[in-house]
Amino acid sequence: MLRVSTGLHAQTQAVAQCDLLPWVSHIFALDQTTLDAVQRRMQDVRDEAVDSPRLLVGRLAALFDVRRQQWVRILFREDVFANEKLLVQDVVRGLPAGSLLLADLGYFSFPWFDWLTDQGFFWLSRMREKTSYQILHVFVQHGTTLDALIWLGAYRADRCAHRVRLIQFEHHGKLYQYLTNICEPDRLSMSEAARLYARRWEIELAFKALKCTLGIRVWWSCDPLLVLQQLFAAFILAQVLHALHAQVAFAAQVPLFDVSLPVLATLLAQAPTRSDGQPLIQRLLEVGRRQGLIRPSRRIEPVVPALLRSYAPAPPDLPTIRTPRYAHRIHQSRSDRPDFVPRFFTFIVI
């Protein structure tokens, strides 16, 4: 797996979307997914109930490189009921300083935000409902549109150490709120933040490709060793498929998601075994235009209201850090689930 990813690095770097917030070293989407259950065909699971947690293979906690469209870190977790935040530091530890992480609300946590900032990472998240905060400075405000520096946690019992930035606007009656430790509006505008966070969805699409396009929603065997072999094979194919996806879009000079990943996989599966000397990308472009490989994407671009007011710069003496206090929340398995002995074990895939 590592050798394949390393071998593809030069190709994916050449077609990487480097215009996406270019001053950031890397942009990663963070998420996890629960793998489907195996069938009851071995002696140790034959008497299990259909909904037994022992039949579930496990969970994948992963990082996806948004610019290069490649998996960069994958943690296979045996406990399918554990909180998302459990072992999350193991997933991101060792990443290059200055990397930006995009994560959904499952990872929303004051200690997590502070730890990322202390490690030299940038992060962008949605705001969780009913989260208390205290405004330190308002860059600009017009109606429900707000760009401001805040303290997360307005009460002594639970509060962040580092100040963060709140970006808020309304569109079609829905209020959008984002949080980030990029506190300078000239480095990350409101529209850039909204468009960038929308790219977090790409790890969801990558998980979908693993399950639907590459077939790990149906396991060939219930033997743990064969299940893991199928999982590794799927990830190897996924790296190659995503690399070709980016290369086809680059060669066609179209946005990445104007190229259909499922159609690309189908065309590759139907490709002739013998080549006529024509490069693969060129052949895919010629055949694919007739078979729907390249078509307008249905992705919806976020719309941010235009601001006519100027930004008020933050005072130079505005505090950036305070003494934190975290509510003692334990990130563990759900208490309403029965205890079970997993058939697999936790390990780093890549």
Image (cartoon, rainbow, N blue to C red):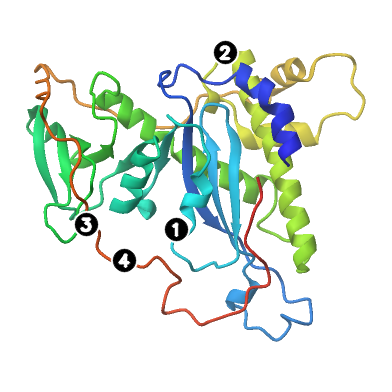
> Which of the marked residues, 2 or 3, is nearer the chain's N terminus?
2
Dots 2, 3 in contact, CB < 8 A: no
Amino acid carrying mark 1 in the image: Glu
For residue 154, above or below residue 143 = below
Q: Which residue is mark 4?
A: 329
* Residue sitting farthest toward the bottom: 47
Task: Kindly report which numbered mark, 1 or 4, lies closer to the viewer in this rendering.
Answer: 4
Dots 2, 1 in contact, CB < 8 A: no
- Does 54 sit left or right of 101 as displayed? right
Structural crowding at the residue carrying mark 3, measured as other residues with C-alpha within 10 Å and reported as few (<14), some (14–19) or many (≥20):
some
Amino acid carrying mark 3 in the image: Arg
For the point 16% across and 34% down, the residue is: 149
For the point 74% across and 31% down, the residue is: 267
Quadrant in which the N terminus appears: top right
Local SS, label 2:
loop
Figure label count: 4
Dots 4, 2 in contact, CB < 8 A: no
Q: Which residue is mark 3?
A: 325
For residue 328, above or below residue 49 = above
Structural crowding at the residue carrying mark 2, measured as other residues with C-alpha within 10 Å and reported as few (<14), some (14–19) or many (≥20):
few
Q: Position of residue 330 (x, y in %)?
A: 36, 68
Return the mark for residue 232: none
> Which of the marked residues, 1 or 4, is nearer the chain's N terminus?
1
Q: Which residue is mark 2?
A: 253
> Which of the marked residues, 1 or 3, is nearer the chain's N terminus?
1
> Which of the marked residues, 4 or 2, is nearer the chain's N terminus?
2
Q: Which residue is mark 1?
A: 84
